Amino acid sequence: MRKISILCSVALVGLMAVSCGQGKSKKEKKEEKTEESAAQNPPGYDLSAPTEYKMPTELLEISGIAFENGHDDIIYAEQDEDGDIYYLAPGSSTTKSAKFGKHGDYEDVAIGNGQAVILRSDGEFHSFPLSEVTAGTIKSQKAKKLLPKGEYEAMHFDNQSKKLYVLCKQCDIDKSTDNNSGYILNLGADGSISNAGDFNVSVTDMGDGEKKKKFKFRPSAMARNPLTGEWFIVSAINKLLVVTDDKWVPKASYMLKGFLQPEGMAFDSKGNLYISNEGDELASGNILLFKYTKPK
């Protein structure tokens, strides 16, 4: 009899659960779905519904991307191996380019103060006038190594502070900590680059006091949202997007599902988000556009 009683109790609980689930209104179900979507997406963006721009062959290994402030009609890009800077209209399959250097491991591009800056993985900067890029011939290039020993992939010129920001992917100085060191630099109108400060990002504390399980956070791209002032940081390893406030305190993280190899990121002046992915033997490189929609 006792076994029968227990079985009846379990069955009753199951019926109650089904009954409660069936009793939810359409409004309640819609609210639940909205809440679930919000947890998977930064406010204003739907990471599951991009517009895809496939890249031509020369940008199979597209890495960094950037816009010139106020000019949303041209995307500047570079790829991992060749010393060329490319530019193209969003959605175009035709590129133009200019050569700035020899074969190397180039990881990101930034545009600011009339200059283009390329970041090499060892922390060396190559800077040259943007006007020379569009002319097709780069003559007055500067190269300088200012950063500590390590591997670097993420760089961004912030139009608000007029500074250049670089974040370590994996640096010797961070080996005994949970931090990713970052560096702030001045970018002159003549292409000169100099140290202006530093910062660090720790993803072990996501802003709610809860300590997350340790995982590899290796920043491959960064950009500042012009509408909110928040920093968006992508880690190709683990395919993760971390959003911090303007003081670099992490607020939330989002899994990048369906991304091949996210290596570059930029915002246009309207707050639309662009993330570039390197291609492989089966898929071309691409740029994914996530249009900004004002949260309700």
Image (cartoon, rainbow, N blue to C red):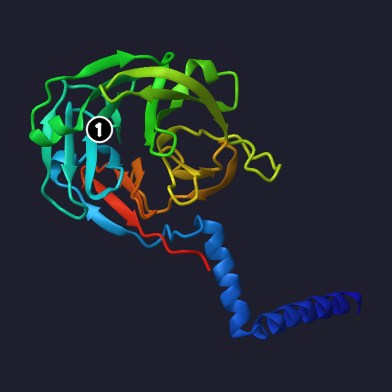
Would you place residue 201 above or below residue 289 in this image?
above
Residue drawn 59% across the image and 78% down it = 29
Viewer-nearest residue: 278 or 88: 88
The residue under label 1 is which amino acid type?
A: Gly
Tell me the element at label 1: loop
Asked if residue 234 lies left or right of residue 16, the reply is left
Viewer-nearest residue: 234 or 85: 85
Asked if residue 146 lies left or right of residue 111, the reply is right
Residue extending farthest front: 189
The residue to which callout 1 is attached is 114
Residue drawn 8% across the image and 34% down it = 135
Viewer-nearest residue: 240 or 20: 240
Residue extending farthest right: 2
Would you place residue 221 above or below residue 94 in this image?
above
Specify few, some or many for label 1: CA neighbours under 10 Å numbering under 14, 14-19, or 20 or more. some
Q: Quadrant of residue 203?
A: top right
Residue 202 at x, y = what percent?
A: 58, 32
Res. 122 in view: no
Residue 194 at x, y = what percent?
A: 38, 17
Would you place residue 127 above or below residue 108 in this image?
above
Q: Look at the image and tell me in which quarter the N terminus lies.
A: bottom right
Total of numbered circles in the picture? 1
Residue 95 at x, y = what percent?
A: 12, 44
Res. 277 in view: yes
Residue drawn 63% across the image and 85% down it = 25
Residue 262 at x, y = what percent?
A: 35, 43
Residue drawn 68% across the image and 39% down it = 211
